[in-house]
Image (tube, rainbow, N blue to C red):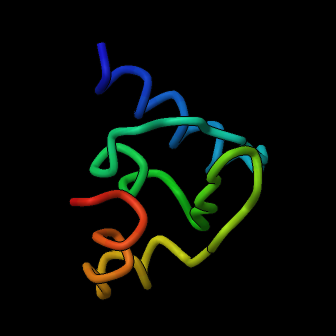
Amino acid sequence: MIALIRDVILKMKAEGFAIVLVEQRVDAVLQVADRVVFIENGTSVASATAADLKNDPGMLARYLGV
């Protein structure tokens, strides 16, 4: 099921749709996102490109504890 949702999101992205995805599974997010925003208590506390996050595991550890 997750793969099907990912495939639909990627197809929509390729067609030019802007998508707001709320997801806790980092691996799923990094597969489809261009940009990631970390929200804490309703406030944006950081943002980065998915590519930057893949290259900076420290940021993931700071905000997600992974």
Q: Is residue 35 above or below residue 29?
A: below
* Image quarter of the C terminus: bottom left
Hey, which quadrant is residue 6 in on the image? top left
Residue 43: give x, y in percent of width and height.
76, 55
Q: Is residue 14 above or below residue 2?
A: below
Q: Residue at x 56, y 38 (%)?
A: 11
Hey, which quadrant is residue 38 in on the image? bottom right
Q: Name the residue furthest top.
A: 1
Q: Is residue 41 above or below residue 44?
A: above
Q: Residue at x 61, y 38 (%)?
A: 21
Q: Is residue 18 left or right of residue 55?
A: right
User: Between 40 and 38, which is closer to the camera in this rendering?
Assistant: 40
Q: How many marks?
A: 0
Q: Residue at x 63, y 73 (%)?
A: 47
Residue 42: give x, y in percent of width and height.
75, 45
Residue 20: give x, y in percent of width and height.
71, 41
